[in-house]
Amino acid sequence: MNPETRRIRIFDSTLRDGEQSPGCSMNLADKLLVLEHLEALGVDVVEAGFAASSPGDFEAVQALARAAKKTTIASLARCRKADIDRAWEAVKDAAHPRIHVFIATSPLHMECKLRMTPDQVAAAASECVAYARSLCQDVEFSLEDCSRSERPFIYRVVAAAIEAGATTVNMPDTVGFSMPEEYEALFRDVLANVPAASSVVLSCHCHNDLGLAVANSLAAVRGGATQVECCLNGIGERAGNASLEEIVMALKTRHSFFEADTGIDTTRIYAASKCVCSVTGQKLQANKAVVGENAFAHEAGIHQHGVLANPLTYEIMTPESIGLPRSKMVLGKHSGKHAFSQRLVDLGFRIDDEARVDELFSKFKILADRKKTVSDADIEALARHSREVDAPERLTLDRFSVVASDVITPMGTVRLKFDGKLVEKVGTGDGPVNACYTAIREIAGLPDARLEVYNLTAVDGGMDAQCEATVKVSNNGRTYRGSGVSTDIVEASIRAYIQALNFALAGGDAPPAAPFDHPQRGDTGVH
Ligand code: KIV
Ligand code: ZN
């Protein structure tokens, strides 16, 4: 790193702001896996969750704090003593703990949400930061909805928070309202009007409601921010947060423009992004910048010609720089275990258990027999499901058959092993999947299990494509997620349902499915 350039800290909130968005909830094993990727990337701070929001969140933040090797681990906390105590309890075992306190400072939020006067907000900010600082050396303070707050009040609260001991001050564009020029000016103005501001880390945090989160974050860097808060794949509340990979690659690719460096090993980006897709089940749009499937694909002949002559003609960064090998070997039935394992690693899966790799490899061989070539999406789907082997398995599929027709009521006969004993039932429904689900519910003895969400997607194109079914099932007030993959849509659907019911049978140990188990926004006031 050139000593002349500024060092920009990367604060990743995939496990907090990202995780709290619908469809992105992760269980503890998922979060630990994401943490490994974040540490390999070299992010400076991982916001591990919001410890006071639920017992599950507390346990996850604590486990991540204990597991992190080098990264600072932060927990979010409202400006309340009880929240701050909970945050500290959760992060205190980390090698580098941080408490992240926030309160809203815009007239709208203070009046309508907090029902507090500006004087009360300023006093609360100061008291809470001081209290957090009495527990932890590293305290971040955020002015929620800062971009819609009034300048004199921002200056007052920033100065008070620094005076009370904040080591980082974050000025979020909470609702994605700002334009880049305005957001840059906010940072310049705070640096010009609050003398102490240059002695702390100034941070930006942008939401993508108008598609400007990355542009605003980069503008903040130009304005003097030295920490950027972001999420992998840009996941997050509503339209998401600023995307980590886009910010990091913009700073790297336009280095002479920004004169700033991050500590990120960009060659780890692709695997980290894939890992987040796999644990959240959320696919990326094909044209997503940096990590989308088409980000380095050249379709037009004129472009292909140019890239072959010299990649720089149409590529401003190389696929290798984000960890995407330029030419990937096609995997098929003649591929060996070594190539297969390497592809798993490239796709962001790290499977330590050799027996699990062997099992996956034999599934891959079976699939390769059915399909000429096995795509990355196929391998990802297989690996995603292997991650679920930790799921309790009281119910397993033995066999099934369906009768589907538009003239008689569809019927499904399903034989399952339930605690080792074969049980067969016949069900009817308005379609073959529904009929099988009726039979499975009866075998499991869970008549009240309700199918809340059902999704079926083709893993890849083509007539021989695998499909992936995902379900959310509610039982006794809790929601359970399940997924299944097969070249047969009924089988994939059955497997997904069985997995969710296995979690339901295990009760409390199930991974919660978003958004049902998640703290409500009104509850926490967080975006
Ligand atoms: O968007 C926001 O303002 C936040 C804060 C809690 C940092 O997420
Ligand atoms: Zn946010």
Image (spheres, helix red, strand yellow):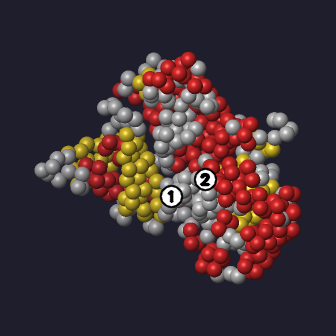
- Left or right: 492 in relation to 46: left
Give the quarter of the figure containing the C terminus.
bottom right
Closer to the observer: label 2 or label 1? 2
Q: Residue at x 55, y 53 (%)?
A: 211
Residue located beneath label 2 in the image: 213
Give the quarter of the figure containing the N terminus.
top right
Q: Amino acid at mark 1?
A: Pro
Q: Residue at x 68, y 70 (%)?
A: 149
Q: Amino acid at mark 2?
A: Ala
Between residue 489 and residue 297, name the one nearer to us. Answer: 297
- Residue 47 in sight: no
- In x, y percent, where is residue 419? 43, 49
Rendered image: mark on residue 22 = 1
Rendered image: mark on residue 216 = none
Q: Residue at x 75, y 73 (%)?
A: 153
Between residue 158 and residue 466, name the one nearer to us. Answer: 158
Between residue 497 and residue 141, name the one nearer to us. Answer: 141
- In x, y percent, where is residue 179? 62, 57
State whether residue 495 is above or below residue 343.
below
- In x, y percent, where is residue 514? 50, 58
- Left or right: 83 in relation to 453: right
In space, the residues marked 2 and 1 are separated at their CA atoms by 19 Å
- In x, y percent, where is residue 56? 61, 61
Q: Is mark 1 within 8 Å of ligand 2?
A: no
